[in-house]
Image (tube, rainbow, N blue to C red):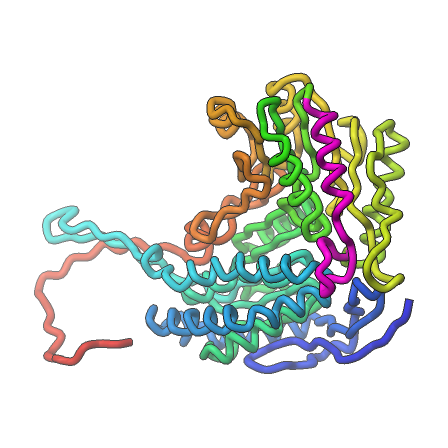
Amino acid sequence: MSTVTADTVEHWINGKTVSGASKRTGPVFDPARGEVAREVRLASTADVDSAVQAAKDAFPDWSGASWAKRQQVLFAFREILNARKGEVAAILTSEHGKVTADALGEVARGLEVVEFACGVAHLAKGEYSENVSTGVDVYSLHQALGVVGIISPFNFPAMVPLWFFPIAIAVGNTVVLKPSEKDPSASLWMARALKEAGLPDGVFNVVHGDKESVDALLEHPDVASISFVGSTPIAKYIYETASKHGKRVQALGGAKNHMLVLPDADLDLVADSAVNAGFGSAGERCMAISVVIAVEPVADDLIAKITERMSGLTVGDGTRGCDMGPLITKEHRDKVASYIDVATTDGAVVVVDGRGVKADGEADGFWLGPTLIDKVPLTSRVYTEEIFGPVLSIVRVNSYEEGLAIINASRYGNGTAIFTNDGGAARRFQNEVHVGMIGINVPIPVPVGYFSFGGWKDSLFGDTKAYGPDAIHFFTRQKAITSRWLDPSHGGINLGFPQN
């Protein structure tokens, strides 16, 4: 593996790139080439302090700015992001490895939340009751928290930050974002775009790093909240540590998403959906379908259809029009591939082994082809653990009830789907399944931007989901005011039309 080091990705603090006090750096790979493309600066606690201080200094003016001013900035940012989304997609492909079409889709889903944030003033309104007692009125206000911290994962370097910071900024907070050190450059692109859109310096800051910078955010006395997406063990650590330090927390964890296939389902639709949801973005999605629960007698026919579709998939460099790119790092590729040996040891049947894939890309790329495993025991680590790669498992059951019981027994409750033409069965499933996001003949049921995203059980720590209406409650605090005025006041004459 070659190691060609180019530029260094720096922090963004108070409206400009900053190297900071730390001299530590980490490698950023081009996973399709298997080589180091650049280095990323790893923040020290002092660097995090600098970013938080910049955000703290910017908070009074930004939180005091009018709704109109804040919305103008977000509208301008939306236009920049939409017009130049190809630039962001190219960054995502170069550092994460996902194919261009998937990278563009990631930006599009992030844009949904930006657009929601542009109109968030309507949902952040308070309430008003007149004359609750004689001459007494009661009303409520939603006010910003202060400095908010965001810690985002490697699999969606643009979309996940976009789930949080547009709404946080819209309601008047200032932000410190800690993106994944594996693919950090998209965060800097967005920081520059926000500045171009007119966002004042200090409102949005980016610090790169590892556990030192994460802990500094979690423990910092001037950070009011933490938003996180990642694996369940880390989500639990984030939740417990930040909560202990008095912060409100939304920590979205891991998943093991099931697709329940009933005998009356359209198996061609199921096969297409299983391949799309299992292998898109190389399976590195928290909403990927990793387990297909087939209610007999459909399993053999369904496996044949899935296998046929898998045979036509191309794996390679995301810039070459392939269907699936590499995994993020060599270590992660090797870990995912190791589950194939686990499956064999545990008595499962490896129908398609992705380890022998011939990729359209450099030999040193972090390649693993789509993998299909049948008859996976529920006791196998292949079933119980989140693999986070292009490995699709088949579990065979004899009834709807048996399949439902398997899903509900899982420690995870992020997403699930049922495929059926029976409306009664679908309605029963949506009420009986213990999962936060449900698809009916939809394999990846990620809610649109004006709903909220989040699971149940070990897939979410904290009471508040991401984006949508939940985010407004998370990023604001409510005040209730009881008021009585004995004499009316006069505000003077002004015939002009107020604009800001």
Specify whether 231 is left or right of 85: right
Tally of numbered tags: 0
* Residue 318 forms part of the magenta stretch: yes
Nearest to the observer: residue 125 or residue 239: 125
Question: In percent of the image, x 84 and y 29: which residue is there?
Answer: 348
State whether residue 239 is above or below residue 48. Answer: above
Q: Using the image, determine if residue 349 lies above or below residue 495.
A: above
What segment is highlighted magenta in the picture?
298-326
- Residue 115 lies left or right of residue 91; in this view the side is left
- Residue 141 quadrant: bottom left
Residue 356, how many percent across, how many down?
89, 48
Quadrant where the N terminus lies?
A: bottom right
In the rendered image, residue 199 lying in the magenta stretch gets the answer no
Residue drawn at point x = 36 percent, y = 72 percent: 64
Q: Residue at x 52, y 59 (%)?
A: 164
Q: Nearer the viewer, residue 391 or 407?
A: 391
Inspect this view and state whether residue 212 appears: no
Of residues 429 and 133, the one nearer the viewer is 429
Q: Is residue 22 above or below residue 278?
A: below
Image check: 31 left or right of 183? right
Vertical relation: 415 (above or below) 295: below
Q: Position of residue 124 (x, y in %)?
A: 35, 57
Residue 491 lies in quadrant:
bottom left
**Left or right side of 318 for 2:** right
Please state, as top left, top right, bottom left or bottom right, where the C terminus lies in the image. bottom left
Residue 262, horizontal then vertical, whole percent: 60, 24
Residue 131, percent from left and from top: 13, 49
